[in-house]
Image (tube, rainbow, N blue to C red):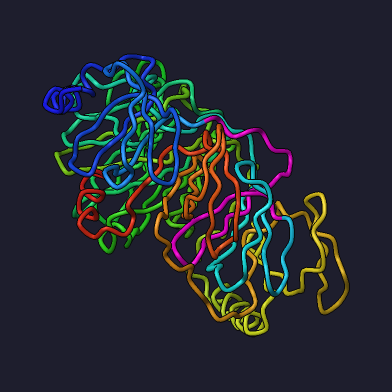
Amino acid sequence: MNARFLTLLLALSPVLARAEDEGVLRFTNEDQLAGTLESLSPELLVWRSTLLDHPTPFHLDRVLDLTRTPVEPPARDSGHDAVLKLTNGDELHGQLASVTDRTIELDTWYAGKLAIPRPMVASLKINHLPKLYYRGPDSLDGWIASDRNRNAWTYERGALRATAAGGIARDHVLPARCRIAFDLAWRSAPRLRICVFSDTPAGDSPANAYELMWQRRYINFRKRWTEKGRPNSLFLGQANIPEGMENEKARVELLCDRDKGVYNLLVDGRSAALWNDPSPQAGRPGGAIHFITEDSTPLRISRLEVVDWDGVVENPPDDEDLNAQEEREKRAKAEAEAEQNGGLMKLRNGDSLAGEVRSIRDGVMRVKTPFAEIDLPVSRLRTIQLKPAEYDEAKWNQGDIRGWLPDGGRVTFRLDQAAPGALTGYSQNFGTATFRSDAFSRLDFNLYNPELDSLRAAKDW
């Protein structure tokens, strides 16, 4: 094929792409080509596209990344999701299989069992594994743009992106009791309204909804509803969010019980506010969620999940009561002493338990405490304070690629072999492992070329 004609096709690819082109291949010269992955090897990637006469090979040293819609993770009955953050920045999700002084073993849906040496683990967190109502975004399908500016929001690379004032909403996504979680990134400082339980997804000012207004370092929480045709409004509280001024990204979680009127806001795992609606039955709430920007400050929303919530308030925010403060200080001192010896577990209700993990079987952990051995469901845990270890970080390998998973995880490994449906590779983090190739929503190549860092960062926005 004529090289000049191919360059033209690459430039027009996003416009000409058809439904059967399920992914996008991006090159180091910033060209991109819609299509489908045909095959992959440590040196070559073969790409099939409706714009090409036949499947075409490309050298990996010319490829920046490929994105596509991954397979939906299978349902799990373990009751928990263990999240390992590794010292190289990777994150692995799975079922906690074992914890020892030397290794932590995860049972994953995408690579089977992975044994991670303790020096490679930065932290271990346990999430409740609830019913999933929504995970995305993976396109603009199902999202409703407001009439104020239908082009304010776009979709790219697994994220909703706003560069102008306007709103976007999704209906029939929020059950009465749920956990809403998403990654929010911004430039300078956030200015964003988030409406939940809205009855009017087509507009930016629903008559019945709860509204979080995030302005720089403060979030105001308000309820709006109509009664006998008359609008009403109730201010429910304010939260101080220093992350809004100190950072440019945060993991935001809102735990909602609409029937009881309980709303718990967490930012980067910190419980920032616990609000109560004194009249939760007032109004006609719906099931829509809105994201509404007020100006042209860039915003990005990704890794949005709506899942069932069991009603447990995690790490309730501190109050100003002196007795409570003294109690917290005593508890913190006891936790610090336990932490020095390792084996401190924090429960999802805010309590702590000092002990040594003896075994894990069928989602139940046997723990030896100073008083007795007890059985504890892993799903009741929030974190396990690992015994002190001298941290190490996996060495870079020539041919390393990075895979991104739909559950929010990522894994870096040297690609050694590719077979239909499987990628086999090596990392000091877990040795040699074989991954389901359809589990990845994105694969990054040429990770350690500094000339490509700015291109990756720019494309993330």
Please tell me which residue is depicted at 48% across the width and 21% down the height of the picture.
172
Q: Is residue 367 magenta?
A: no
On the rendered image, what quadrant is the N terminus found in? top left
Residue 200 locus on image (x, y percent): 36, 19
Please tell me which residue is depicted at 14% across the width and 39% down the height of the picture.
296
Residue 227 versus residue 316 in the image, above or below = above
Q: Does the magenta stretch include residue 78?
A: yes
Q: Which residue lies furthest to the right in this view?
A: 372
Q: Can residue 261 be seen in this view?
A: no
Q: Which residue lies furthest to the left in this view?
A: 4
User: In the shown orientation, is residue 220 left or right of residue 317?
Assistant: left
Residue 75 picture quarter? top right
Residue 224 picture quarter? top left
Of residue 328 and residue 147, the one placed in the foreground of this image is 147
Residue 77 locus on image (x, y percent): 73, 39
Residue 157 locus on image (x, y percent): 33, 36
Write the start and end of the magenta stretch as one range.
Answer: 71-96
Of residue 331 and residue 109, the one placed in the foreground of this image is 109
User: In the shown orientation, is residue 255 left or right of residue 218?
Assistant: right
Of residue 346 and residue 228, the one placed in the foreground of this image is 346
Of residue 360 and residue 256, the one placed in the foreground of this image is 360
Count every numbered label the image shows and give the total: 0
Q: Is residue 94 visible?
A: yes
User: In the shown orientation, is residue 455 left or right of residue 249?
Assistant: left
User: In the shown orientation, is residue 245 left or right of residue 125?
Assistant: left
